[in-house]
Image (tube, rainbow, N blue to C red):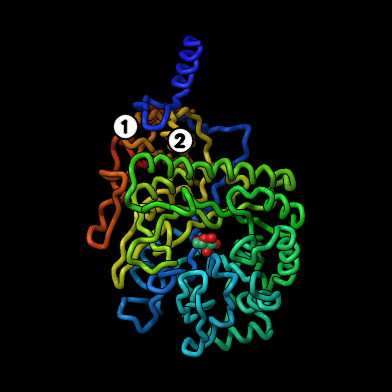
Amino acid sequence: MKKLLLILLSSVVAMGVVAQNQQPAQKNTSVRIALHNSTQQNQIIPREIYGQFAEHLGRCIYGGIWVGEDSEIPNEKGYRVDVLEALKALKIPVLRWPGGCFADEYHWMDGIGPREQRPKMVNTNWGGTVEDNSFGTHEFLDFCELLGCEPYVNANVGSGSVEEMAKWVEYMTSDADSPMANLRRKNGREKPWKVKYLGVGNENWGCGGNMTPEYYSDLYRRYATFCKNYSGNRLYKIACGASDYDYNWTDVLMRRVGNQMQALSLHYYTVMDWGRKGSATQFNVDDWYATMGKCVEIETVLKRHCEIMDRYDPSRRIGLLLDEWGTWWDEELGTVRGHLYQQNTLRDAMVAALSFNIFHKYTYRLKMTNIAQMINVLQSMILTRDDEMVLTPTYYLFKMYAAHQGAEYLPLHFESAKLRDKNRREVELLSATASRAEDGTITVSLANVDVENECRVTIALDDDKKYSVKGSILSAGTIDAYNTFDKPNEVKCENFTSFTSEKGSVEVVLPAKSIVSLTLK
Ligand code: AHR
């Protein structure tokens, strides 16, 4: 019996799996990149994988993006100049708006015409805040033009009518001599906008109407029928998808809606326990690993939703869009309840890195993701306080990873040491991804999840070239480091030089709790 136990124990250690708190010292790891993959078709990482989400929630729109033309905060036609410039550097491909739960209470006609005449409403989902509708369709679509990104408009199914949705599409995209196009012209916009992405409801299994998948499928078919392609604009219609582990929702939608949708959405948050989410800034090493465990569980979730979609749609015509994801912590003390304001530490950046490393693998089906949310809400890029602005660790991670946008996904092969977190989830201590841009530049991003030990990685490429390498790193002295308005540079991207390049390989030493991106030319 004792002998059997010893054998079992030694085989567990050999696999690199250790129990919680017993961290293995990182060994040398070899990462092989297959540059010439003859069996697989080129898989491109759509730019939209790096999408954003801005809801009428807390200070995401008001105070975050929009301060109005009369504000003392420097603005361009009402948009904060500091925020706009910082966002441009992220090369944002797509922005989802106006919600979230807000979408299914939003009536777009309240947000057009002279601002002082727009009716007010109460934002019942998010703190009962009064919404004055000063940021509406024109303000959003013009903002997307300024940012140079695609708009993703999420329309109202839960409390809106088919007519209302159909007219919104006409208002935004038609160039005809038609009632809605003429109303748009009257409101100051002569030419229609291009609006590709149209969401037909949000979380209709919950805040969007508490519907069954069968009922929603029928509604989707009806609403989508009346959303037309005007004046050369081609809509990409997105059906409301499942939350996390609700595989039945995906199954029913695929069966009953099928080809009537271009994509199906999915929401997955890195949240430990909806009742006790935990502090964004006060946590220990066990919490760090538990967060990573929950974060990487998205791989199982994506895989299962993809498998269901594959059964109904083997040619992969219908996209899967993860249009809400990210960390969700307790709201910061002293902030308005329901505004979901949270700080953002190195842990959040690590979550983003592990998430993207997984997302890239599934881009054969996964066509867009939208982190929740862009400014001042949940896992944001930017926090603002009056006229001040601070960039979060997640912002820097998005900037580091921008090189993967639109590049060819390169499969990696490696074995990582693993541990079990306090919830018995398995966490690999090394996470990595690679892609090749059109000009041949290879970007390799490596995340060392280990909070104590550095990790020596040999990147082996199946060619003879000696690459010229440049690197950047995101790390900090402690796992809970974050940027504040007083200390805005505690966590930021820095130059990284801890590597050597030989013919066909690059050797790199990753410090503990760090994310490194290398460009190989
Ligand atoms: O992102 C915050 C909220 O989370 C969204 O409004 C909703 O769709 C989800 O439940």
Residue ID at (70%, 78%): 163
- Which amino acid lies under the numbered mark 1 shown in the image of this protein? Asn
Q: Secondary structure at mark 1?
A: loop
Q: Which residue is mark 2?
A: 427
- Which amino acid lies under the numbered mark 2 shown in the image of this protein? Val
Image coordinates of residue 441 in percent, x first then y, are 44, 42
Q: CA distance from mark 1 to mark 2?
A: 15 Å
Towards the viewer: 449 or 204: 204
Image coordinates of residue 195 in percent, x first then y, are 59, 69
Q: Which residue is mark 1?
A: 453
Hey, which residue is sitting farthest front in the picture?
A: 1
Q: Would you say 335 lies left or right of 136 here?
A: left
CA neighbours of label 2 inside 10 A, class few (<14), some (14 to 19), many (20+) = many
Q: Nearer the viewer, mark 1 or mark 2?
A: 2
Residue ID at (77%, 56%): 256
As drawn, 369 above or below 519: below
